[in-house]
Structures are given as C-alpha cells and as structure tokens.
Amino acid sequence: MLLNLIYILSALFAAGICFAAGGFSSLGWLWLLPLGFLGGFVLCLVICVLAVWIPSLFVDPEREQDGDDPYTRAIVKLYAPAVFRLLGCRIDALGTEKLPKEGRFLLVCNHLMELDPGIPLTLFPDAQLAFISKKENLRKPIIGPMMLKIQCQLLDRENDRAALRTILKCISILKEDKANIAVFPEGGIIRDGKLLHRFRPGVFKIAQKANVPIVVCTLNGTQNILSNVKRFRRTDVRFRLLEVIEPEELKGVTTTQIADRVHAIMAADLGPEHAAG
C-alpha cells in the first residue's frame, strides 16, 4: 500500500516536472519523465524516513512504555510490507489462518537475520506483536526507539537477573492484555548455514505462567535477502505457521520439555539436516 502510494506520487511529480518544462510537445520529456520519477521517489523516501526519525529523537530509553504508541504501531503496519517489497521479497506464507483470533499468545520462530521480525509484523499487522530482543538493539537509530514504542522487551543475555525481569515483564504484558509476545528462542543469529539451533528454554516459561498458547512458526529465505539485493535478484521467503500448542498442554511439564517439543516441530518442517545438533 505505502509503496504503491509512493509510486503514484513519484509519477505525479514526474508529470508535473514535464508540464513545468513545457509539456510533452518536445522530446525533452523522454529524459525529464524518468528523472522526475526518480527524484520524486527519493523525495518520498526521505519524507518516510523523517516521519520515523524525528519522533524517535524524543523517546526516552529509560522510560518504560505503558502500552502501544498508536502512531508507531501504524507506521510499522505501513512500513514493514513496503520494506520487503522494496528489497524484492516475495513471502510465501501457509498456516496463517491458525493464528488465535481471541486471547493473547506467545509466538516463536527460528532466527536467520536482522530483518526476521518484519515478516510476522507484515503477515499479522493487527496482532500487536511485541518482540523480545537483545538490549544492544536499543542503540540502533530509529529502530531502537520504535521497538520501545511498540512494547518490545530488551533482554540482557549477560545478566541473569535482568533477563528474569524481562521474562516477568513479558508475562505481565500478556496477563494484562497489552500485547502478544514474539521471541526467537535460539537467543540470537548463528551464521553457520543451518536454519535451526538449540533453544534457550527459559522463554517458554512466559507461556506457562501467562497461561497462553504457543504459536510455532518457521522461516526460511530471509538469510538470502541482502546477497540477492546486491545481485538484483528476487528473494523467496518461506513462512509457515505450523502448530498452536494450547495452554493445557504446557501444564506439568518442564520448559526444557516444551523447548524440545517445539524444536522437533520446527526441525520436521525445515528438515532435520538443517537443524544444528
């Protein structure tokens, strides 16, 4: 939607440039039209960046966000699909109809590259997803402040007590019906050619304590986006919502057992040969 609007505005800008230069009566429009379109496109992109950069300057990273910021959530809805279209991605998604329509949930997925959160945000724009992310991401311009404004929770992987506080905060968010939590249980990106790695089981305590279902998903293809962009190639991204594990199934079992079950479901979909031991 956003990218289509940018294309239309760029075309109108190019047409305006041509008319201002004397219309289409001479052959000058042959170079003015594409040049004007490019100029309009760049101008629209600059405006889009300013629309998120300027508000990010006023975000206090020390202040806890109580609920979603409507403006930031609306920006995410608009920008996420536009970014992937701009990068030449085609998302092949199956099983999205299984996403719970009522009540909160914990969404888990394998992690391949930094753009991964944008796929669920694109496919489920109204699901109000708040991701658990490493605290280092807070230092990223624009991205860090935007994460805070949509209730993303920052995890200190080097501090167990701080990590526990993050887990407890996520449980509270779910119980208080403020957002749905999304997490990559591998705890980070491991670039070894594998699609799935060992889980940190502690994150599954969130679903147990909040009494919410676990939405199990897999991703494949995002790891190729940047290399394909450099070669001007399209990237096919594969997303699967495999299973929804109901809260009743999480009772009386350990988080390690839950992690093993979820890992097995993902490995069966991605292929055991793509799962690291």
Image (cartoon, rainbow, N blue to C red):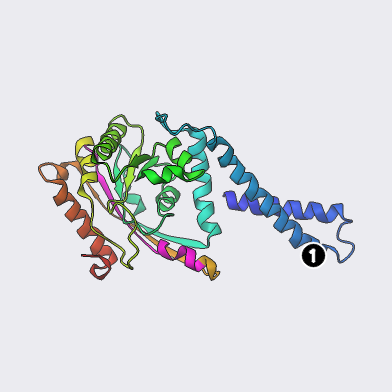
Please name whichever residue, 238 or 272, is drawn nearer the observer in this view of the structure: 272
Q: Secondary structure at mark 1?
A: helix
Residue at 13 percent across and 41 percent down: it is 251
> In this picture, which residue range is highlighted in magenta?
211-228
- Number of numbered discs visible in the structure rendering: 1
Residue at 16 percent across and 42 percent down: it is 248
Left or right: where 186 falls relative to 86? left
Disc 1 marks a residue whose amino acid type is Trp
Please name whichever residue, 157 or 209, is drawn nearer the observer in this view of the structure: 157
Please say if 69 is above or below 143.
Answer: above
Please say if 100 is above or below 113.
Answer: above
Left or right: where 24 falls relative to 85? right
Residue 217 lies within the magenta run: yes
Q: Quadrant of the C terminus?
A: bottom left
Residue pointed to by mark 1: 31
**Residue 165 image position (x, y, % from top left):** 27, 35
* Label 1: few (<14), some (14–19) or many (≥20) C-alpha neighbours in 10 Å: few
Please name whichever residue, 239 or 205, is drawn nearer the observer in this view of the structure: 205
Please name whichever residue, 203 or 176, is drawn nearer the observer in this view of the structure: 203
Please say if 120 is above or below 63.
Answer: below
Q: Quadrant of residue 110?
A: bottom left
Residue at 49 percent across and 49 percent down: it is 80
Left or right: where 18 falls relative to 231? right
Residue at 53 percent across and 37 percent down: it is 56
Q: Quadrant of residue 100?
A: top left
**Residue 50 image position (x, y, % from top left):** 61, 42
**Residue 256 image position (x, y, % from top left):** 15, 50
Residue 253 lies within the magenta run: no
